[in-house]
Image: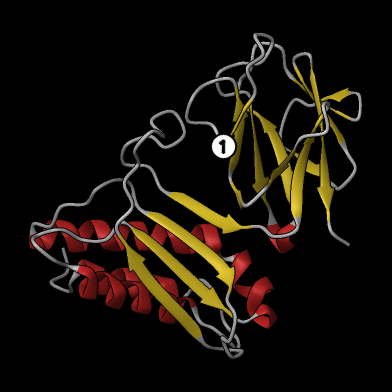
Amino acid sequence: MSDQPRIERFLEHAARMASGSGIHPIEVLQRIQAAAEGSVRDGAIANAYQVEFAAADTDRVGRLGEQLARGASRMLDELAAGRGLRRLGPWQFEFAPGPGVAPGSLRVSATYREPAHRPETIAAGSTRVITRQRGKRIVLEDGTRVPLTHTPFVIGRGVGCDLVIPDLSISRRHAEIGSGPGGVLTIRDLGSRNGVSLDGQRIEAESELWPGATLTLGDARLWLEADE
């Protein structure tokens, strides 16, 4: 096996994930590594990382979000293990446009985030890429509007879901709203008992979710509402 440090190999691998001008994956991982090293205190390392960029860089960074999260997770695993550091919970990464960030630039922050009260949503050791959402709401049949503040966003009957609906026709973790390339929202069934329908059609796999679409989870109906 090469004597080259594994963290450096992760960074070199990231350099091959994309090419061209603008924000480069290696720069993102280097900034996450620097934030992680700066967060160390009392033998612990931050487990949640927010990467902010200019709105003009959304397509580029968003397209690589999953790859960057996987690479950063491996890099931080190696960093923590090599220095004997502990973490409070699974690695979490949020990639989102930030106010005042110039095109081609990044702002990375590290925080300690406990997974308290979310045992069903986040499994130990898993990686969760969190994307902030703005101007979107889930509308329930009784007119209640619940802000869709981030994705993944889990809907179900169990405590720990992002939206809890106390209806026995809904599974404890019924469905998840996610985000795909270009900011498109998606909906997928999490193996629920009574299924998920989108505008009257039952979905078998992940499907695109658009504003105004009607979701049926068990006996409950809800809608996605978004600002224009």
Q: How many numbered marks, from 0 up? A: 1
Residue 155, horizontal then vertical, whole percent = 63, 30
Q: Quadrant of the N terminus?
A: bottom left
Q: Would you call the spot at circle 1 few (<14 residues within 10 Å), some (14-19), or many (20 or more)?
A: many
- Please, is residue 216 above or below residue 51 in the view? above
What kind of residue is marked 1?
Asp
Q: Nearer the viewer, residue 7 or 145?
A: 145
- Please, is residue 44 above or below residue 22 in the view? above
Which residue reaches farthest front? 143
- Please, is residue 185 above or below residue 181 in the view? above
Rendering quarter of residue 135: bottom right
Residue at image point 68% right, 53% down:
180
Q: Which residue is mark 1?
A: 162
Q: Nearer the viewer, residue 60 or 47?
A: 47
Rendering quarter of residue 189: top right
Residue 219 as seen in the image, left or right of residue 78: right
Residue 14 as seen in the image, left or right of residue 191: left
Residue at image point 35% right, 52% down:
91
Element type at mark 1: loop
Residue at image point 13% right, 66% down:
41
Residue 205, horizontal then vertical, whole percent = 72, 31
Q: Nearer the viewer, residue 141 or 42?
A: 141
Residue 170, horizontal then vertical, whole percent = 66, 15
State the scheme by which the image is colored.
Answer: secondary structure
Residue at image point 57% right, 82% down:
19
Q: Quadrant of the C terminus?
A: bottom right
- Please, is residue 177 above or below residue 140 in the view? below
Residue 182, horizontal then vertical, whole percent = 73, 63
